[in-house]
Amino acid sequence: MTTAEAIFRAAQAHEAAGNINAARAGYAQAAQAGDLRALTALAKNLLTRAPLDIGNGIGMIRTAADRGDREACALCAVLAGQDDQLPDRWRIARDYLARSGDAKLSALLSSVDLPVWTMAPAQRVEFEGPRVVRVDNFASRAMCDWLIERARPRMSAATVYDPATGTGQRRDDIRSNSAVAFDITQLDLAMVAVRARIAALADVSSDAFEPPMVLHYTAGQQFAPHFDYIEPATPGLAADVARNGQRVGTFLLYLSDGFEGGETDFPELGWKFKGGKGDALLFWSADATGALDRRTLHAGAPVVSGEKWVLSQWIRRR
């Protein structure tokens, strides 16, 4: 094992243990010794672990990509695709994707005209107050399958906000499904394209998005009636709203079919929705003035049989 390799592995161990400063120092030392993976790892650490250093993280990931690191090229594709101020962003993103060597993702996106596909799709208004819209065929079946397989290896028990602190997550009997979130370094260009299409549908910038989540329900699993907005009257949660803005919108992309039960149920509206594979739902928990709407109480009804997969994208407003 080379010296750079040993330093890199030690830095990985420090990061796994939560010793961020030691991890960054180790990655930097290994990178200086010529380990290109360490430069990419340091950039990812700066982009995702507090204290964040977004500017240096992006600069480092671009340097690593220019030097030929495939993982860095994949992340540069994500960064380019998310930059709606970047002229010709989808061409640049595709170029980085090609350099990453991800043949499967390239094949998935090969027939997709990204500049056109990421425009606002046709929608059907189900309710004006609260505003609830649906989109049929928001995403292809192949795209849905891709998202499921990206999520499947990382699923774990779903959690809810801890109302006491507003900062942690805890298990609760209110939900029994599994879930996984994707931070900036775990996204890929397909996910970025989906988020750009969501942003166009909702008429917001993707800067307003939380990390996307994929949810999985098997027979008997559910998410009991709840609100997606964050209760501002609870001190711990009010602090989260002050930091990050209120959660005002929810987008759901239904990734699977062939299951029984599992409807998205709005009891205050007397309405249930069970989208087909590739269909989507967008509803707003707050109006333009910021007033929260308790009619958006909703539940993921118990799945009777089969598997339900959903991509969830929450929208914040500062």
Image (cartoon, helix red, strand yellow):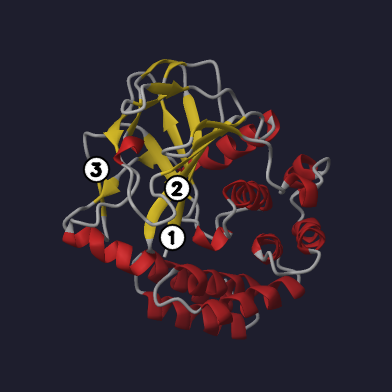
Residue 171: mark in rendering: 3
Q: Earlier in the sequence, mark 2 or mark 3?
A: 3
What element does badge 3 sit on?
loop
Q: Amino acid at mark 3?
A: Arg
Is 233 left, or right, of 184 in this rendering? left
- The reply to whether discs 2 and 3 touch (Cβ–Cβ < 8 Å) is no
Q: Residues within 10 Å of mark 3 (few under 14, many from 20)?
A: few
Residue that label 1 marks: 317
Q: CA distance from mark 2 to mark 3?
A: 23 Å
Query: Local crowd at mark 2 within 10 Å, few (<14), some, or many (≥20)?
Result: many
In the image, residue 55 lies at what x, y percent? 57, 80
Question: What residue is shown at x 39% (from left), y 80% (from top)?
Answer: 21
> Is 153 rendered above or below residue 261?
below
Residues at circles 2 and 1 in contact by the CB criterion of under 8 Å: yes
x then y, percent, for residue 232: 24, 57
The quadrant in which residue 87 appears is bottom right
Kindly state the secondary structure of the residue where label 2 is placed: strand
Q: CA distance from mark 2 to mark 1?
A: 9 Å
Tell how many labels: 3
Going by the numbered disc 1, the residue's amino acid type is Arg
Q: Classify 10 Å Cα crowding around label 1: few (below 14), some (14-19), many (20 and above).
A: some
For label 1, the SS is: strand
Relative placement, left or right, of 21 versus 94 is left
Of residues 39 and 264, which is closer to you in this image?
A: 264
Residue 239 coordinates in the image, percent (x, y): 25, 66
Q: On the rendered image, what quadrant is the C terminus found in?
A: bottom left
User: Would you name the residue on which mark 2 appears?
Assistant: 249
Name the residue rendered at 49%, 22% in the picture: 274
